[in-house]
Structures are given as structure tokens and as C-alpha cells.
């Protein structure tokens, strides 16, 4: 059974890259379904694009709570 993965990150995305490499190398039977970041210029978004994925940027609302942001995600 193929594992479906959703990634939430705000930085460089080195863990995401490891997952991407493992999938491409046949070491992991998985499919990355979504990549989300609250940081518009996080490199993880670029890594996702380079892997053919369409990442999502969901910014934190000014004055909003983490709980409200988590609901949007």
C-alpha cells in the first residue's frame, strides 16, 4: 500500500528532500500529496516545486492565533 504524505514545514525542507529522494530511489513506497508552509520564502516551497509538486503557502494572520491557523491548514 502506498503511503500518502503531507508535509508542513517553515524552513529549508531537508527532511522533505530526504523523503523525495527515498521515493525517487524506490526505498519508500509513498506519494507526497501536499506541502504547506506559513513562510512565503521558505526554501521547502522551492524544493517542492523542483520535485513537481504544487506547494501551498498559508500565512499566519496578524493577530491571529496558532489554533486559527491550524484550522485553515
Image (spheres, helix red, strand yellow):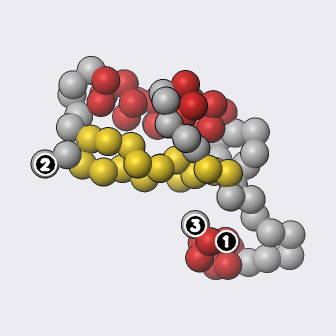
Q: Which of marks 2 and 3 precedes in the sequence?
A: 2
**For the residues bearing labels 3 and 1, Cβ distance under 8 angstroms:** yes
Indicate the quadrant where residue 61 lies: bottom right
**For the residues bearing labels 2 and 1, Cβ distance under 8 angstroms:** no
Helix, strand or loop at mark 3: loop
Q: Label 3 belongs to which residue? A: 73
Residue 64 in the figure: left or right of residue 28: right
Indicate the quadrant where residue 18 lies: top left
Helix, strand or loop at mark 2: loop
Q: Residues within 10 Å of mark 3 (few under 14, many from 20)?
A: some
Residue 11: image x %, image y %?
64, 41
Indicate the quadrant where residue 63 lies: bottom right
Residue at point 47%, 50% (across, down): 34
Residue 71: image x %, image y %?
59, 76
Residue 35 visible in the picture = yes
Residue at point 20%, 37% (across, down): 29
Which numbered disc, 2 or 1, marks the residue closer to the eye?
2
In this picture, is 38 found above or below 11?
below
Q: Label 2 belongs to which residue? A: 1
Which corner quadrant holds the C terminus? bottom right
In the depicted view, which residue is nearer to us: 42 or 2?
A: 2
In the depicted view, which residue is nearer to us: 53 or 28?
A: 53
Residue 32 in the figure: left or right of residue 22: right
- Hey, which residue is sitting farthest right in the picture? 62
On residue 54, which mark appears? none
Residue 42: image x %, image y %?
69, 39
Amino acid at each position: 500500500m502506498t503511503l500518502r504524505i503531507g508535509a508542513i514545514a517553515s524552513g529549508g525542507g531537508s527532511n522533505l528532500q530526504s523523503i523525495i529522494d527515498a521515493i525517487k530511489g524506490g526505498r519508500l513506497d509513498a506519494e507526497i500529496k501536499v506541502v504547506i508552509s506559513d513562510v512565503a520564502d521558505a526554501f521547502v516551497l522551492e524544493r517542492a516545486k523542483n520535485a513537481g509538486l504544487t506547494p501551498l503557502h498559508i500565512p499566519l494572520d496578524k493577530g491571529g492565533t496558532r489554533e486559527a491557523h491550524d484550522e485553515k491548514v
